[in-house]
Amino acid sequence: MMDLKLAQSFALIALNAQSSLYMTNAKKVSLRCMAAAVILEAYLEGCFTQADNGLTFRKEVLEQPNSTLYRETVLLPLLQNHAEVQGDLGWWLNKASILPNNKVKQFEIAISDDLKALNLLEEVPSLLGSDMYFDSAGVEVKDYRSNIEVYTSITENLRAEILEEGTVTDEIICLLWLLRESGCMHDFFSRNELEKINTRMHDLYRSNLWAKSLFQIQIHHGMELGIKRFLQMKSKFVKTDAGSSINFLFPFLERSQAVFIETEAWFDNPTTRLNSVLTRLESYGHEVKVIGGGSIATLKIDNLLYDAMPHFVMMKVPIQGVRLVPKRPL
């Protein structure tokens, strides 16, 4: 896999299956966390100068050859025409996460263009566009799709490093924090795995200075989280010394809705029914892989898992089809 920067890696996770045409609430949360990832990326690369009073960033750093446009779209607004600005890590992360909406849009364009140029991101018809009602209405809906091979490599490396014993890199610590703040832990880990991860993060907080510094910072309180409030649930495995619960149990951000795909005939054979749905999805340009068969098949569509459940809707006559329901790790 090519050597990606931290913000690029997280963007491939966060943008996948998000609307590319509209600024949904879920995408805004992702973008604000991606902006925070830019700060962490710059910090890990030594772009900040450490002083007793905090971290200093100088505008001249953005003039270096290794600087990127997406980094400039985040840092220049924070500099506010000053040659340098100083603040602690929490200050920088929070400031990046509350950029004005117009700056957030500029950042989206910059980082998505960067990834498209590397052939790591593309815009494809949204799975929602395959829904019977959207299809019949002729509504254009497009989503981002991350390169499947690279997306899988990033997420599997993250899972392996955090779920297995051994050293955890600074980059993985950053990705864990970013997943926590964006509310996306549920997309990649089962409930049992989340308990293990919480223990792992607890241990890292106690033994790793970088984790201790980062895990106690929260930025989600200042962002549009897509929910009115977190579930105020207390559990022994979500309370840590860091004083910031992992928030595994709040209603996670839905990137995709259940989609109904009608079939042209009433298929008694589940294999024939599934093949009809696969043909439909592939005709729309989706990358589809059957993970598990049976009466309720599991499909991997554009990097996300769905249960394909036989279903019908009542119109003037019953219409048979399959309801694609986002599948979460158990």
Image (cartoon, helix red, strand yellow):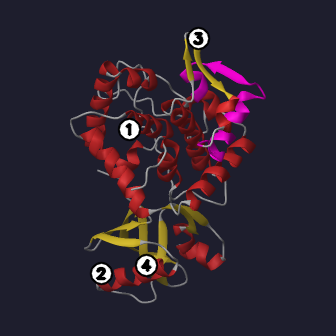
Q: Nearer the viewer, mark 1 or mark 3?
A: 3
Spatial CA distance of label 1 from label 4 is: 41 Å
- Judging depth in this view, the residue of 39 and 273 nearest the camera is 39
Residue 284 to residue 34: above or below: below
Q: Secondary structure at mark 4?
A: strand
* Disc nearer the start of the sequence (3/2): 3
Q: Are discs 2 and 4 less than 8 Å apart at CB?
A: no
* Disc nearer the start of the sequence (2/1): 1
**Residue highlighted by disc 4:** 321
**Residue highlighted by disc 1:** 172
Quick one: which residue is furthest to the bottom in this view? 265
* Disc nearer the start of the sequence (2/4): 2
Q: Is residue 14 magenta?
A: no
Q: Residue at x 45, y 65 (%)?
A: 302
**Residue highlighted by disc 2:** 270
- Judging depth in this view, the residue of 11 and 301 nearest the camera is 11
Where's residue 24, x and y in %? 63, 51
Q: Which residues are magenta?
A: 66-93
* Disc nearer the start of the sequence (1/3): 3
Amino acid type at circle 1 is Ile
Left or right: 151, with 292 as reference point: right
Q: Which mark is residue 53?
A: 3
Mark 1 residue crowding within 10 angstroms, few (<14) / some (14–19) / many (20+) = some
Residue 311 to residue 250: above or below: below
Mark 3 residue crowding within 10 angstroms, few (<14) / some (14–19) / many (20+) = few
Q: Secondary structure at mark 1?
A: helix
Quarter of the image with the N terminus in it: bottom left
Total count of labels:
4
